[in-house]
């Protein structure tokens, strides 16, 4: 295997396994920042050794073994090993969390000679699936801790759980790489200074913290699905990453309805990806999309997740949560073979429930669209006009965009043109601006 092929293999393994490695080390060290640093050390060792020796038969175990040895060495150097013995309890727990002297010797042999690594690291003690899952869950809740800003949670989640580099995150969000690096450094420092425990919250705290986790994942997905700025209408990498993390969370928390509701929502929305842009990257709006291009596999997965979310809510005696309700709206579109078959009356009814559950100006704006499709543009315009003075929507380009559409459908062309102009001025996405300026032109030439 060539050096470039080996590097690609290392990158692929790292993207898949890095979160598990960091989670395992974080549980040992109780320090997420240090855990990532030592995991990166293991990656550097692989980059140095694998091109000459070849990719091990079990590369994930190799990286985990190398990382754990780095952690053990760090504990020894800082004279913390005895304290960790006391913290972690019985010897059997210690063997799972830190590794014994025999383990260190086995790793030495695996790394320095490569013999045991090449045969699959047979002698290396492997964490159970339950332990790996527990570590991942802890890492998710730590990365999305409310002590961090929204931007910091997103950056740290993509870094620790997505395995993305700071450069990849910066390019995805169109910010300088130095800005992302600072956010990540400050986030890890904030977690340390706040003594945030590496754990999954219990009791009443779980709901609040889970809400933060889901919000971060959906924020990542939405930035990929409808980019707020830049030249591209979509950034599929972010959609894929959010969906991958959502699926992992659903496996780790199988009894939480809203986790499945969010996965359902992302699966169904992601199914439209291929139909949302033309060959040259121009946006194609929902009602104009070729539904034959929608991914039926993703739709099927989304509908199954939605059913599971609904069943869990019913079993727990709960009402459907906001993500499950939004997924139900997406499902109405997915089930309609053509745009004209869309059940807008049902969608408007679901938005009524969503608006009561989580009232917000954005939900109300979306409800206005559904109402206009179900009962006419005048009904939608009435809702939108009540939002004009809403401070949260002052610079939100979709408010004048939606209002312009209602006005156009009502034949109030001059007013529609001014609304589309305002929307074009407010958006930071180049593709969306082009689309809105086309609407302006359509009002000018009467087409």
Image (cartoon, helix red, strand yellow):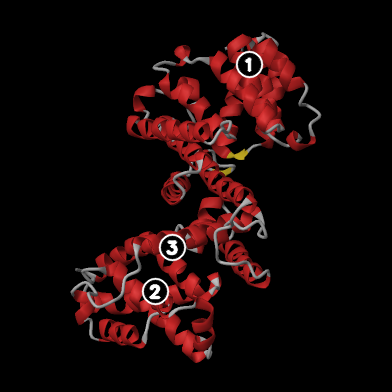
Q: What is the number of the mark on residue 19?
A: 3
Q: Earlier in the sequence, mark 2 or mark 3?
A: 3
Q: Residue at 43% of width from left, 30% of height from top?
A: 307
Query: What x and y, as percent, mark residue 320?
Result: 56, 31
Q: Nearer the viewer, residue 2 or 367?
A: 367
Query: What x and y, as percent, mark residue 364?
Result: 68, 26
The crowd level at tag 2 (other Cα within 10 Å; few <14, some 14-19, many 20+) is some
Mark 3 lies on a secondary structure that is helix
Q: Residue at 54% of width from left, 43% of height from top?
A: 218
- Residue that badge 1 annotates: 371
- Residue at the extreme right of the image, as rendered: 389
**Foreground tag (1 vs 3):** 3
- Residue that badge 2 annotates: 96
Residue 243 sits above or below residue 365 on the image: below
Q: Are marks 1 and 3 in contact (CB under 8 Å)?
A: no
Mark 1 lies on a secondary structure that is helix
> Disc 1 to disc 2, how far (Cα)?
57 Å
Q: In the shown orientation, is residue 38 left or right of residue 174?
A: left
Query: What x and y, as percent, mark residue 381?
Result: 71, 16
């Amino acid at each position: 295997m060539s050096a470039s092929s080996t590097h690609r293999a290392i990158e692929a393994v790292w993207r898949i396994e890095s979160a598990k490695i960091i989670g395992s080390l974080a549980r040992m060290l109780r320090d997420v920042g240090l855990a990532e640093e030592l995991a990166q050390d293991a990656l550097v060792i692989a980059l140095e050794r694998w091109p000459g020796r070849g990719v091990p038969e079990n590369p994930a175990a190799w990286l985990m073994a190398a990382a754990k040895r780095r952690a053990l060495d760090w504990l020894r150097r800082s004279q913390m090993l005895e304290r960790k013995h006391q913290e972690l309890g019985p010897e059997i727990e210690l063997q799972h969390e830190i590794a014994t002297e025999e383990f260190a010797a086995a790793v030495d042999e695996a790394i320095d000679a490569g013999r045991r690594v090449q045969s699959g690291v047979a002698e290396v003690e492997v964490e159970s699936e339950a332990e790996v899952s527990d570590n991942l869950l802890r890492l998710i809740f730590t990365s999305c801790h409310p002590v961090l800003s929204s931007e910091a949670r997103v950056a740290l989640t993509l870094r620790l759980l997505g395995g993305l580099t700071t450069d990849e995150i910066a390019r995805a969000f169109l910010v300088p790489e130095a800005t992302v690096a600072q956010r990540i450094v400050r986030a890890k420092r904030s977690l340390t200074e706040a003594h945030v425990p590496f754990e999954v919250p219990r009791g009443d705290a779980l709901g609040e913290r889970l809400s933060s986790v889901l919000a971060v994942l959906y924020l990542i997905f939405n930035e990929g699905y409808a980019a707020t700025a830049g030249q591209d209408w979509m950034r599929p990498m972010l959609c894929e990453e959010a969906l991958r993390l959502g699926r992992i969370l659903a496996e780790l928390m199988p009894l939480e309805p809203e986790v499945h509701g969010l996965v359902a929502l992302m699966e169904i929305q992601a199914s439209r990806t291929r139909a949302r842009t033309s060959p040259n990257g121009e946006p194609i709006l929902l009602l104009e999309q070729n539904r034959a291009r929608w991914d039926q596999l993703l739709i099927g997965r989304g509908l199954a997740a939605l059913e599971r979310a609904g069943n869990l809510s019913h079993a727990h005696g709960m009402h459907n949560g906001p993500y499950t309700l939004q997924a139900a709206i997406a499902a109405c579109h997915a089930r309609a073979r053509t745009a004209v078959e869309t059940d807008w009356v049902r969608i408007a009814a679901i938005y009524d429930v969503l608006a009561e559950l989580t009232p917000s100006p954005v939900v109300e704006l979306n409800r206005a669209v559904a109402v206009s499709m179900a009962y006419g543009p005048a009904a939608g315009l009435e809702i939108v006009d009540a939002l004009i003075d809403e401070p949260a929507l002052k610079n939100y380009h979709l408010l004048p965009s939606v209002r312009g559409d209602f006005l156009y459908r009502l034949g109030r062309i001059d007013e529609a043109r001014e609304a589309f102009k305002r929307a074009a001025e407010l958006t930071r996405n180049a593709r969306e601006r082009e689309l809105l300026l086309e609407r302006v032109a359509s009002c000018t030439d009467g087409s």
